[in-house]
């Protein structure tokens, strides 16, 4: 409990709302809400309760039905909840109607992600990209809650341009969008010049879903002090480090993580950051092997890579966090075959967690020779990963430098 004269900031409280339908069955919605709660926690909010409702499609007025809305309202008022966060994007009219009804802050998934990006952005480029995305998000959503730019309003979802109430004059918002676009054009030219200077160096980019351990792996491979944290979007700014394996040097880039329902405005605004991926020679696609929906996360990343036109690059699939998987001998064994319980998952698309042995057998059985299973934290199979990276990088390196000869005078081995 905060003391009466304490300067500690009280964390905001939130409830989460999602709908269940044919496209999003119960078990998926539960997983989405867990991820939304993690997003809220990353933003600094405490999730108090989750509400779901079965609807074929969202209600055009309140997103949920009137009965469920009254249930949410009663809980919000009884527990003095600061905000209600919806797992899908809301229309401007839905936001306005919900604010009038619930009398608290209303956020959707996109605005929550934008808020996290605004917290995480450190460089001038990242801050400009986030502010542009925020203005593009609010332009069609201008309501009386954004009255003047002169007043400040804090809290989750109100950072950056939201810290000052936004003017209802659409022309001024469009002018700001144009200004940020010009700033990014200038930054893009500077980055393009910088990347040209790297053309004679092999480039490797870490890609993957958010919070799969890319930054931890970056620290391990580059032996540098790269920020890593068990929170979503710990990395927003791209980080580049030189790495040498078997005297072959290359540049390793840690990039922003992807996520389901990533706001399109962010993908557009972060195109210069994503250029690091486009211009990479090799991609290390890092996967959280311990996550129950890691295959869906793989698909999310692959779809995003396809969207930015890099799905054909040489890629090494790196299954991280295998230390969290059970071993075959740790599985509960039934004494009699009749005791085994068989689950028909043909219609639910649900798959029980795999052991490391099952995971390896599955992917090797599919012919995925470019798959490595590691633990960045426990440093498991890192030598094997280094060799796999070397095999990928050396092909490109010797294309650039066909007359390169290994000797002790060229590069010092970093092991």
Image (tube, rainbow, N blue to C red):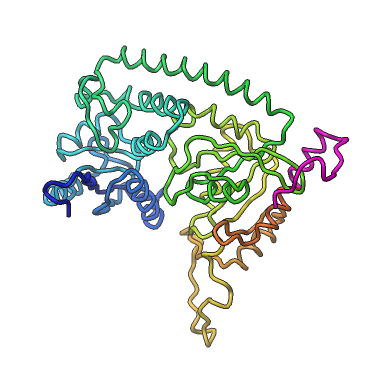
Q: Residue at x 50, y 79 (%)?
A: 332
Tell me where the magenta segment starts and ends, as one range: 391-415
43 with respect to 238 (left or right): left
Q: Which residue is drawn at 16% across and 40% down?
A: 102
Q: Which of 388 and 178 is in front in this view?
A: 388
Q: Which of 203 and 350 is in front in this view?
A: 203
Q: Residue at x 55, y 21 (%)?
A: 188
Instruction: Judge whether 343 appears above or below 306 on screen.
Output: below
306 with respect to 58 (left or right): right
Instruction: Say if the magenta span includes residue 405.
Output: yes
Instruction: Say if the magenta span includes residue 264.
Output: no
Q: In which quarter of the image is the N terminus?
A: bottom left
Instruction: Count every numbered label the image shows and give the total.
Output: 0
Residue farthest front in this picture: 409
Instruction: Judge whether 64 appears above or below 31 on screen.
Output: above
328 with respect to 76 (left or right): right
Say which quarter of the image contains residue 101: top left
Instruction: Judge whether 335 appears above or below 291 on screen.
Output: below
- Residue 246 location, x and y as percent? 76, 48
Instruction: Judge whether 346 appears above or below 22 on screen.
Output: below
- Residue 162 location, x and y as percent? 28, 28
318 with respect to 147 (left or right): right
Say which quarter of the image contains residue 143: top left
Q: Which residue is drawn at 38% across and 33% down?
A: 118
Say which quarter of the image contains residue 203: top right
Dominant secondary structure, magenta: loop
- Residue 380 location, x and y as percent? 62, 62
């Amino acid at each position: 409990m905060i003391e009466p004269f304490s300067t500690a900031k009280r964390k905001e409280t939130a409830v989460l709302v999602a709908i269940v339908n044919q496209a999003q069955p119960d078990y998926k919605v539960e997983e989405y809400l867990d991820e939304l709660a993690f997003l809220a926690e990353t933003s600094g909010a405490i999730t108090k309760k989750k509400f779901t409702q079965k609807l074929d499609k969202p209600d055009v007025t309140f997103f949920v039905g009137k009965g469920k809305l009254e249930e949410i309202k009663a809980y919000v008022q009884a527990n003095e909840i600061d905000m209600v966060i919806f797992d899908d994007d809301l229309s401007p009219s839905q936001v306005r109607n919900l604010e009038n009804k619930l009398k608290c802050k209303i956020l959707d998934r996109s605005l929550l992600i934008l808020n996290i990006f605004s917290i995480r952005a450190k460089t001038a480029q990242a801050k400009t990209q986030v502010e542009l995305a925020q203005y593009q998000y609010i332009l069609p959503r201008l309501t009386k809650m954004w009255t003047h730019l002169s007043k400040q309003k804090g809290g989750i979802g109100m950072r950056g341009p939201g810290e000052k109430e936004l003017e209802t004059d659409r022309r001024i918002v469009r002018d700001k969008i144009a200004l940020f676009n010009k700033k990014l054009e200038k930054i893009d030219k500077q980055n393009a010049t910088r990347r040209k200077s790297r053309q004679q160096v092999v480039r490797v980019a870490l890609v993957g879903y958010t919070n799969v351990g890319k930054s931890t792996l970056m620290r391990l491979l580059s032996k540098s002090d790269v920020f890593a944290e068990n929170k979503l979007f710990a990395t927003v700014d791209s980080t580049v480090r030189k790495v040498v394996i078997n005297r072959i040097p290359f540049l390793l880039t840690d990039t922003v993580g992807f996520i389901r329902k990533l706001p399109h405005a962010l993908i557009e605004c972060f195109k210069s950051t994503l250029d690091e991926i486009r211009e990479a020679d090799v991609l290390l696609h890092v996967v959280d092997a311990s996550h129950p929906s890691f295959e869906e996360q793989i698909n999310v990343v692959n779809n995003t890579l396809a969207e930015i036109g890099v799905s054909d690059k040489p890629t090494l699939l790196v299954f991280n966090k295998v230390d969290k998987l059970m071993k075959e001998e740790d599985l509960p064994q039934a004494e009699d075959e009749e005791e085994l319980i068989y689950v028909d998952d043909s219609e639910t698309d649900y798959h029980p967690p795999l052991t490391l042995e099952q995971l390896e057998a599955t992917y090797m059985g599919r012919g995925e020779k470019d798959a490595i299973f590691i633990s960045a934290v426990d440093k498991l199979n890192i030598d094997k990963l280094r060799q796999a990276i070397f095999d990928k990088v050396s092909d490109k390196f010797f294309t650039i430098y066909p007359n390169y000869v290994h000797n002790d005078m060229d590069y010092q081995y970093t092991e």
